[in-house]
Image (cartoon, rainbow, N blue to C red):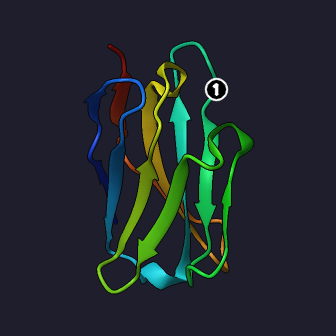
Amino acid sequence: VSVVESGGGLVEPGGSLTLTCKCSGVPFDEYHASWHRQTPGKERELVAFITGDGNNARIVDAVKGRFTISRDNDRDLVSLEMNSLKPEDTAVYYCKIQGMSSNTEFWGQGTQVTVSS
């Protein structure tokens, strides 16, 4: 199983980035997907979640209205579109997939997002 994030980088406040997570080795549409982030000294926190069929999604309040999660089950991808970025969005962003009928979960290696002028 492979879960690989991409798209991180350095962006100025107010800017945008789109993170992409490419998955392989599992029947992707049988896995829920989520994005999490972590900064040094803090616990990893959930940012956004989407069901396996893509019909339901949830965004945490801290990024609601600025971030959007989506998935393409034909391409085994889940994306996080991030707009109006703030310095406090700086973190390592991780992608996770979790089996819909099991507790099996897989994490990516993370991608750094830095929001700074």
Closer-to-camera residue (47/66): 66
Q: Is residue 44 visible?
A: yes
Q: Position of residue 92 (x, y in %)?
A: 42, 31
Closer-to-camera residue (2/37): 37
Residue occupying image coordinates x 64% and y 77%: 100
Residue occupying image coordinates x 35% and y 50%: 19
Residue 20 sits above or below residue 39 on the image: below
Q: Position of residue 104 (x, y in %)?
A: 58, 65
Residue corresponding to mark 1: 43
Residue 28 sits above or below residue 87 on the image: below
Residue 48 sits above or below residue 87 on the image: below
Residue 17 sits above or below residue 105 on the image: above
- Kind of residue at badge 1: Glu
Q: Is residue 2 visible?
A: no
How many numbered marks are there? 1
Q: Position of residue 58 (x, y in %)?
A: 68, 60
**Residue ranking furthest to the right:** 61
Residue occupying image coordinates x 44% and y 38%: 93
Q: Quadrant of the C terminus?
A: top left
Q: Secondary structure at mark 1?
A: loop
Left or right for 30, reference 13: right
The quarter of the picture where residue 111 lies is: top left
Closer-to-camera residue (9/97): 9
Left or right for 83, reference 3: right
